[in-house]
């Protein structure tokens, strides 16, 4: 017979949201161009557009991992009204928006390909990536991909999933063909893992859970040591998928 959990675990439990939504406030008319810029993927490779969104709110820009749509959902009405009255910001906004319009209106090569099968492409990038990793540096990665593809062809496919209950998750790791590992986590550890299903930072997770940053960082490092999470530049991503995709 399983004993009842301590009262503080019942009444002090933090509830997890089933889904989260970003609600964007209506932008002041003077800042309407921000929405045009946020909804066009050009911001992802245009340095001036990214600088503009960083100016809107540097902390929120970093907290959203440089997502302009989410950024506009976090900025306060007071901040937006302040920006609308800032002549320097408004000049920069106008310049960046004008550049977007020139980019969209320019007679480019792709737009001239009438009747070509290329017209069926949803989005065409004319961007050349610099500072790429030399091919020889990818040897281990390519070997890992090849091994994974061979595993996927076996009757027992690799699997990394988690199931949950209030204040608890269990991760089932069947990536090894010979052995299944099962990991159970409770409390902050369980909540932190779920929150990093979408790339998270220790500061964001600690804020969501109202927990100490040191405690959260310790949990995230533990997940990385177990191979259940990856970290890059202080950002963490949980690798296991939920058994129920509707959670």
Image (spheres, helix red, strand yellow):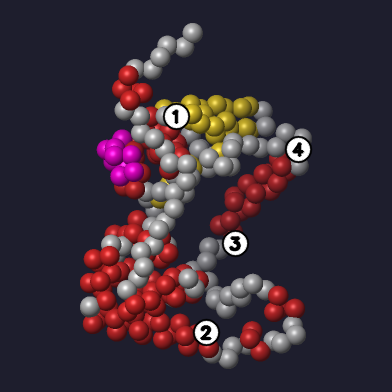
Cα–Cα span, label 1 and label 2: 49 Å
* Residue 178 position (above or below residue 61): above
Q: Tell me the number on the disc at residue 104.
A: 2
Circle 4 SS class: loop
Labels in figure, total: 4
Mark with earlier residue (1, 2): 2
Cα–Cα span, label 1 and label 3: 46 Å
Mark with earlier residue (1, 3): 3
Circle 3 SS class: helix
Any magenta on residue 90?
no
- Report crowding for label 1: few under 14, some 14 to 19, many 20 or more residues within 10 A (C-alpha): some
- Report crowding for label 3: few under 14, some 14 to 19, many 20 or more residues within 10 A (C-alpha): few
> Relative to 230, is 50 on the left or the right?
left
Q: Tell me the mark number nearer the camera, choosing from 1 and 2.
A: 1
Q: Tell me the number on the disc at residue 57.
A: none
Cα–Cα span, label 4 and label 3: 29 Å
Cα–Cα span, label 1 and label 4: 35 Å
Q: Residue furthest bottom?
A: 107
Mark with earlier residue (3, 2): 2
Residue that mark 4 sits on: 154
Q: Which residues are magenta?
A: 206-215
- Do callouts 2 and 4 mark residues in contact (Cβ within 8 Å)? no
Circle 2 SS class: helix
- Residue 229 in the image: x percent, y percent? 48, 41
């Amino acid at each position: 017979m399983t004993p009842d959990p301590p009262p503080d675990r019942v009444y002090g439990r933090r509830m997890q949201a089933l889904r989260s939504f970003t609600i964007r406030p209506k932008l002041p008319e003077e800042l309407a161009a921000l929405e045009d810029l946020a909804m066009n993927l050009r911001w992802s490779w245009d340095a001036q557009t990214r600088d503009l969104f960083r100016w809107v709110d540097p902390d929120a820009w970093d907290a959203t991992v440089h997502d302009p749509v989410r950024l506009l959902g976090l900025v306060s009405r007071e901040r937006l009204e302040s920006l609308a009255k800032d002549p320097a910001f408004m000049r920069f906004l106008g310049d960046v928006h004008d550049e977007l319009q020139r980019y969209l209106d320019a007679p480019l090569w792709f737009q001239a390909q009438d009747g070509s099968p290329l017209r069926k492409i949803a989005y065409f990038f004319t961007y050349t990536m610099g500072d790429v990793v030399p091919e020889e540096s990818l040897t281990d990665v390519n070997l890992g991909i090849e091994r994974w593809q061979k595993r996927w062809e076996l009757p027992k496919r690799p699997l990394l999933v988690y199931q949950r209950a209030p204040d608890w998750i269990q991760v089932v790791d069947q990536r090894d063909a010979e052995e299944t590992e099962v990991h159970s986590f409770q409390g902050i550890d369980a909540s932190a893992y779920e929150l990093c299903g979408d790339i998270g930072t220790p500061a964001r997770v600690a804020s969501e859970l109202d927990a100490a940053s040191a405690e959260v960082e310790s949990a995230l490092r533990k997940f990385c040591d177990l191979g259940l999470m990856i970290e890059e530049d202080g950002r963490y991503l949980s690798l296991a998928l939920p058994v129920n995709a509707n959670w």
